[in-house]
Amino acid sequence: MAAHTARACGIDFGTSNSTVGWLRPEQPALLTLEDGKITLPSVVFFNYEEDHSVFGRMALQEYIDGYEGRLMRSLKSLLGSSLIDSQTEVQGRALPFRQLLTLFIKELKLRAESAAGRAFDEVVLGRPVYFVDDNPQADKLAEDTLAEIARQVGFKDISFQLEPIAAAFDYEAGIEREELVLIVDIGGGTSDFTLIRLSPERRSVAERRDDILATGGVHIGGTDFDRQLSLHGVMPLFGFKSRLRNNAEMPSSQYFNLATWHTINFAYTRKAWMDLQDVHRDASEPAVLDRLFRLIQQRAGHWLAMEVEAAKIALSNQDQHTLRLDQIEPGLQCALGREEFNQSIDGMLRQIGKTVDQLLTDAQVRAEQIDTVFFTGGSSGVPALRDSVSALLPQARHVEGNLFGSIGNGLAIEAFKRYGAA
Ligand SMILES: Nc1ncnc2c1ncn2[C@@H]1O[C@H](COP(=O)(O)OP(=O)(O)OP(=O)(O)O)[C@@H](O)[C@H]1O
Ligand SMILES: [Mg+2]
């Protein structure tokens, strides 16, 4: 617990969930943002019937309740994507994606301020090691865009800290001797790694650059696992990989759109619909395509993606999970197994493993030298992922942090260090 009240807050704007941390005495750092919970899901729903926009769990609820409207998820994925300069249609009006992000960050600030009972002018924003892989210019642009949005919603002083370093500060708050730690943060959109020297004595040091031996990251996260599970286990029921009468493969773009959170709405365009009508004539299994048509007509893409995500989370604790798809076709079910899920993400786990190997090489550190692997981020819940990272560092101690709160906690510590007491 902190001895002082901090002047600034820290914001962990995540692909799936966001948190705001603020250090103050006698209280946990993470502010409650919705229904007494420390996370606000990074989701906006434009409810056309009620003519309002809602955020977080309430957005998901109104969407599930069947209100007509538009659901926007994975907002952070827009940063660093070429979509950021384009717009989307909401209730017949053009909404620039930038403005969509601004709406969400503004809401986050308002809720944090209402929970804190004061305004914040200074903020430390978390950022992934890479917003964009292998493209420093695009990466810089993504950070600049986020800074500009933070300024627009009223922050006057804005600085950044890498998300995994923030997670490291959270772990460091509780250790008793020096350790060499690999921080593994697997969230919704990115996997980030930091090799860092932590110790009780170093906590008070302001500049920690020398303690960071290496950072690495790759643009893979839980939403990619959702996509893989959907493409491997669910989309084939809707005709993905089926054949046309001339033996050509069914065009795949709408399946990819439906399996990817931030492109689901693209499957609802008039053009997509016309294209699918065209292929329907050539389909060898038209009944399967009829399911796809119902899915699109019902605008049920987000519902299905949520079911797939829930199945993925269930498979972290059990071997089997069955999706019930009666809404699409009475009696339609889809059995998913953990083994099948593991296979579908195998290539991604290998990429994650390579990133860890590369990081050790960059740092010129042998696996045996690492004392602890600290896991955070919701996707650290996937057993195959923890196992594959742990297998690379068999001698290290494995610690599971607060999967959803470590970064916000660490950013709160950093905000106090940088901006001082109120
Ligand atoms: N028990 C679980 N098993 C597997 N995955 C889980 C579990 N719980 C949550 N997830 C996944 O974790 C992801 C969200 O994690 P988190 O909230 O850490 O991400 P984020 O911080 O929003 O994303 P990022 O840091 O990449 O921007 C989602 O993809 C969610 O499906
Ligand atoms: Mg995160």
Image (tube, rainbow, N blue to C red):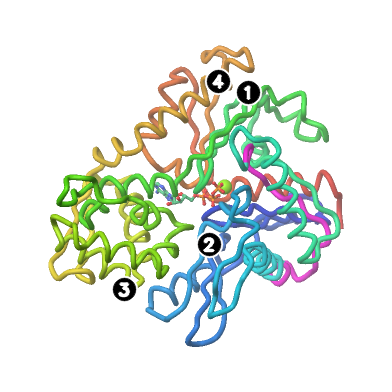
Q: Which residue is mark 1?
A: 179
Mark 2 element type: strand
Mark 4 element type: helix
**Res. 77 in view:** yes
Q: Position of residue 105 (x, y in %)?
A: 67, 63
Q: Earlier in the sequence, mark 4 or mark 2?
A: 2
Q: CA distance from mark 1 to mark 4?
A: 21 Å
Which mark is nearer the camera, 4 or 2?
A: 4
**Label annotation for residue 44:** none
Q: CA distance from mark 2 to mark 3?
A: 26 Å
Q: CA distance from mark 1 to mark 2?
A: 33 Å
Q: Which residue is mark 3?
A: 297
Q: Earlier in the sequence, mark 1 or mark 3?
A: 1
Q: Earlier in the sequence, mark 1 or mark 2?
A: 2
Q: Earlier in the sequence, mark 1 or mark 4?
A: 1
**Res. 1 in view:** no
